[in-house]
Image (cartoon, rainbow, N blue to C red):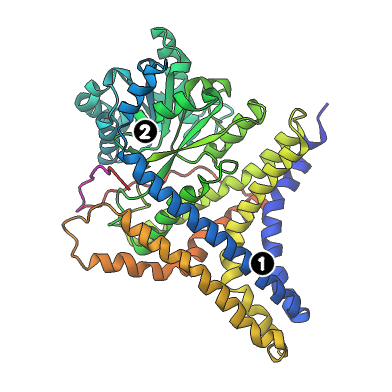
Amino acid sequence: MQKWFETIWFKRVTEILPGALTWLAILLPIALSFFMPVWVAIFVVIFDLMWLVKSIDFTRGVLSTYFVMKDEQKKDWNKELVELDKLGRNSNEIWQAIILVTYKEPYEVLRTSIESYVKADFPAQRKIMIFAAEERDAENAKNHFLKLKKEFGSGFAIFEMTVHPDGIPGEIRCKSANTTWGGRQLQKILDERKISYEHVLISNFDADTRVHPQYFANLTYKFLTVPDPLHTSFQPIHIYNNNIWDVPALIRLVAFGSSFVLMSDCQKPKRFRNFSSRSNCFKTIVDINFWCVDAIPEDSRQYYDSLFAFGGKHPVVPLLTPVYMDAAFASTYWGTFKNQYLQLRRWAWGCTDIPYLIKKSLGNKSLSPWFKFKHIFHLLEWHFSWATAPIFITFVGWFPLLLHPTFRDTVLGYSFPGITGTILTISTLGLLASIVISLLMLPPKPSQYPKSKWANMILGWLLFPVMSIILSSFPAIDAQTRLMLGKYMEYRVTEKAVAPKTKPALSTSV
């Protein structure tokens, strides 16, 4: 008998929930400003104060993580492993496997990523490379694979290509379907060679993911020292600076903002989640039956599947020897902007985790109601804030003054702009810290750009309010509205164009 929370009507109710809350929050202050401007003003002041507290906490997290990252990158993690082995841990048993998912990416992007894995300071005889291609791009991918294997094959014990068949029943066209196919082929390879799953660390990487030279050594060390390695995820900080000098100012702000969110969140262990490129013990992935094959937000879905599979015990440990990725880029400015918007909308499609998590929670009796409520609330609050916070800060404060003719004549109405202005001005101090950190994280300036490019990197931050609306709120509202209306998205691969004048270079530090 079908349970009530598995019915289509309940599914639609939970799909409508995030979009309905967002639109209610946007429209209600407009309506109330005509009749109850005082209440709207009080709400704005309270919201701005909360935003100030969040801004301080966010800035503290970014600064703290940045300085720890600098220290972590100075360490020789292989020496740390030698010391660990003296205590009875055997790091020489650990293998590093990479699944590099590709679909129509340029050869230059793939080559530079794989070059970074070869140059990473970890024994080649314990590295495995799975080049995971799609059947609908098989010929192109095979040509790339043969060239890459010829150049880099000696840098791995195993260098194999897998081809994910198109149209498998129950699957959608998404990254994780390809990754799962590659993971199952890797499982066969490990079984043939009698390599224990518990000794293999699997990194699920995008085509443009490059690693810090100490990444695999640090990952091995963290795996051998965490309390429960088989139920743990290892999440690197993503630094989107492979092509940061080449992209427009708005795109740079998104790139830095994405890195800063991870840097801040990793200071909150109970709220840190899987995102994009990440690593796990292969046994962990086998135990959750690999990655989902029917969802777009596969990174967060992996987290929730693991959380329920392991009885609520699934910490996500930050790796502060980072990975380096491309900011959105295309051959034209409009194409770049479109690329970025669609990528952000795809990330915002993580709102589909809300109905998924509600259903999983109602179907689970082993975890406490409070535990499940906290995770649902945090996820809902995150997507709600993503969609509404920039709009609240930029626009809602004007509604009482513009829509109620006499409110300006009241004591609160007269003081209101000064109060909110002061709060938001203090909040911008965090933005100044972000500007400084963004400049410190930049790779060396390519020679084709003049020194004046530095001024552009700084002045571009003046567009932050525009970016926060157009490339933050709007993609989130778009995704939630589509889900609310039942207009389900299909997975779209972000174009990985290479700047014509820029030779890709390996990043080695923040």
Indicate whether residue 184 is drawn in magenta: no
Res 447 → quadrant: bottom left
Q: Residue flagged by tag 2: what amino acid is it?
A: Asp
Q: Which residue is mark 1?
A: 26
* Residue occupying image coordinates x 63% and y 64%: 50
Q: State the residue at coordinates (27%, 42%).
A: 508
Label of residue 207 in the image: none
Give the camera-side residue of 213 and 15.
213
Give the residues drawn in magenta, as a range: 501-507
On the image, numbered disc 2 is attached to which residue? 137
Image position, residue 139 (x, y; %): 31, 29
The reply to whether residue 386 is in sight is yes
Pinpoint residue 308: horizontal percent, then vertical percent. 66, 30
Left or right, 44 with respect to 219, comes to right
Whether residue 193 sits left or right of residue 428 in the image: it is left
- Please tell me how crowded label 2 is: few (under 14), some (14-19), or many (20+) other residues with Cα within 10 Å: some
Work out whether residue 423 or residue 23 is closer to the camera in this orientation and state it. 423
Residue 124 position in % (x across, y down): 27, 21
The single residue placed furthest to the left in the displayed view is: 447
Disc 1 residue type (three-letter): Ile
Is 505 magenta? The answer is yes
Q: Main secondary structure of the magenta part?
A: loop
